[in-house]
Amino acid sequence: MEAFVSALLNGVLLGLAYGLAAIGLNLIWGVMKVINLSHGAFIALGMFASYFLFHSFGLSPFVSVILVLALGLVVGMVAYFIALHRVISAPELSTLLSTYSLSLIIIGVGTFVFTTNPRAIDVGLGSLHVLGTYIPAAKVLTGVYSLIFTVLLYIFLYKTWTGKAIRAVSMNRVAAEFMGVNTTFILSLSFGIGIALAMVAGALIASVFPFTILSGGVYELKSFVICVLGGLGSPLGALVGGLVLGLLENVLTLKMSVGYVPFIEFLILVVILLVKPSGLLGKE
Amino acid sequence: MRRFLSVLVGLLFLGSILAGNVWAKNKIVIGFTMSQTGKLNAESKDQFDGLKLWQDWVNSKGGIYVKALGKRLPVKFVYYDDESSKDRVQQLYVRLINKDGADFLISPYSSGLTASAAIIAEQYGKVMVATGAASDSIFNKGYTHVFQIYTPASRYLTGSLDLLKALDPKAKRLAIIYEQSNFAKAVATAAKKYAEKKGFEVVLFESYAKGTTDFTSFLNKIAAKKPDAIIGGGHFTDGETFAKQLYEQRIRVKLVSLLVAPAVPKFAEIGKAALYVTAPSQWEPKAKYSKEAAQRLGIEWYGPTADWFVREYKKRYGEAPGYHAAGGFVAGLVLQKAIEDAGCLDSEKVVKALEKMNIMTFYGAIAFDTGEYYGRQKAHEMVYLQWQMKNGKLVKEVIWPESAASAKPVYPYYKKY
């Protein structure tokens, strides 16, 4: 029973963090119709940003995450103008290759600078005693922060003028431009927010698990599964997809070998693609 | 012209005989490669440092006594950089034998490289003392010239089961969690077999992918199955992460024994999570193998004491020796003993001496298998260390076997919660 409760709690907390990472990918796809293959690289960058803020300035990842968010926004917007702006109207393959090359550059330089030695952030917060099981406090905070960031994003997208402009561009870029929306700014902002969310997710995950510059790849793959599962272009769907994945990984393994979980995850992916390609919460 | 050539050939021939005699009579040439570059560099260098210390020790006494010649011969090393590469190892060992006239060989560092070198040693009928190589599979290929210093992988974790049995005969439930690598798999499979033979119940036997960072699923399973002990692991990072998450989830087990990670000093960085974790190690500076222990067991003591080795090593290299360095020193020591016992430099006679060898050194007991796994180490035991708290600091103490123990084991593991 304790094991089950623990699996459930761990699954939900981890699922929220997965969801947050996936929302970044989802937003960029929804607004720009760009499949961002540099997603994982930016998650890894977020991990390292948090690592250096912790070790150089002694900032807890749960404080420095605001700085990582700001950094991500700036880096993302700059990356947009360097790598995407000129090919944004080109066929999808061009933007795919462009973001892929961005990923290769980040991983390549990162490997050179940071090496692939594993690193960890030990926040030293101990564990919380919840419902008869112990959960690392960092994991709880990661889950809570992920939820807060998701809610903030939701408010931003649905309650502010800029957020509404982002949604307008995602619905119809040309029409939005006619209505006086500066689409170039909105596109770069969307990419910035997407990257910022990826980096924030990375920073939070780094407080729980050790990582290397290559760790982003795992979470990128998960993000793709989550996006397809929850529905591309739907932030809420990404959160639901993240929770499904987190719970699968933790609850299913109570009864079966851990090695089978990726198989089940990707099986679900294939089934969703066959039966409901728009995802669980996606619009037709 | 023809006469000139034949004279030249004759001179060269004579020269080589003379040179050969001069070499054989003045010194003993020991050939090996080390990984001065490549991924094995760090461990290989420690092994070399240990070996070098042995050379200086034995030469300071005039060398190895060879009865047939009635005198001591100093030891000369010939070695090359193998670049941590199997191909280089084979080329270089051929060169060591043919060109450099090595009388005896010592293996490179690591099982992989040693397996390559062993083929050459066997082909040329040269004795090779294998150190830094724990694999069992090198020794079931029918070689008759390769002798192992390390405890083989198949016995890496079996001692922790003996320890558990001694501490708590009622503890029966065992979880084995290991990394998907050849080494960890070999260790885990052998441990499982041994556990079942000794009456343990293996309630969980599962592997995790290389690079796993989230062990939550495994820990939940462990929490559900309630084992008494967890053994397994793989390399440093995964082992450290596992120990950390085990502590964070406050899993109530009585014994935790992991490969590799806890034996590395850096393991202490996870703080209280490291406390009471145990690990096998080939040797630890605190291991108390002594003349008295040898006497009690009725076997011959050979070579310097552990205190001497640790002191001299520190003096020379500025750091405490690890098991890689000890393995290097003992490889030389074993060869020395075999040559003295054989009384000559003939390879086959030295092989006979190695077959009969049964000694205790500061590194532990040494004797070799002569059955199916000819040359495999059969007497040396892993020592088991445990992270304990001394004066507010985490320290490694040797807790098993009793003949080497520097402290009493703290049991159960969950005492720290």
Image: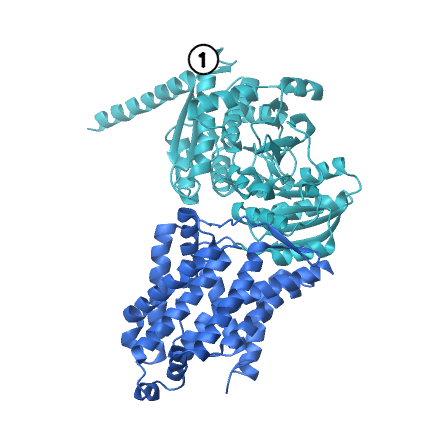
Chain colours: A blue, B cyan
Identify the image quadrant of residue B356: top right
The one of A179 and A95 positioned closer to us in this rendering: A179
Left or right of B123? Residue A99 is left
SS at badge 1: loop
Find residue B154 and report its horizontal and vertical position in percent: 63, 42
Question: Looking at the image, which residue is at 56% across and 27% down?
Answer: B285
Viewport quadrant of the N terminus of chain B: top left
Find the residue positioned furthest to the top.
B70
Find residue B96 and report its horizontal and vertical position in percent: 40, 32
Disc 1: which residue: B62
Question: Looking at the image, which residue is at 35% across and 57% down?
Answer: A108
Chain of the residue on which disc 1 is drawn: B
Find the residue positioned furthest to the left.
B1
Q: Is residue B298 visible?
A: yes
Label 1: few (<14), some (14–19) or many (≥20) C-alpha neighbours in 10 Å: some
Question: Looking at the image, which residue is at 47% across and 55% down?
Answer: A61
Left or right of A73? Residue B391 is right
Find residue B137 and report its horizontal and vertical position in percent: 58, 43
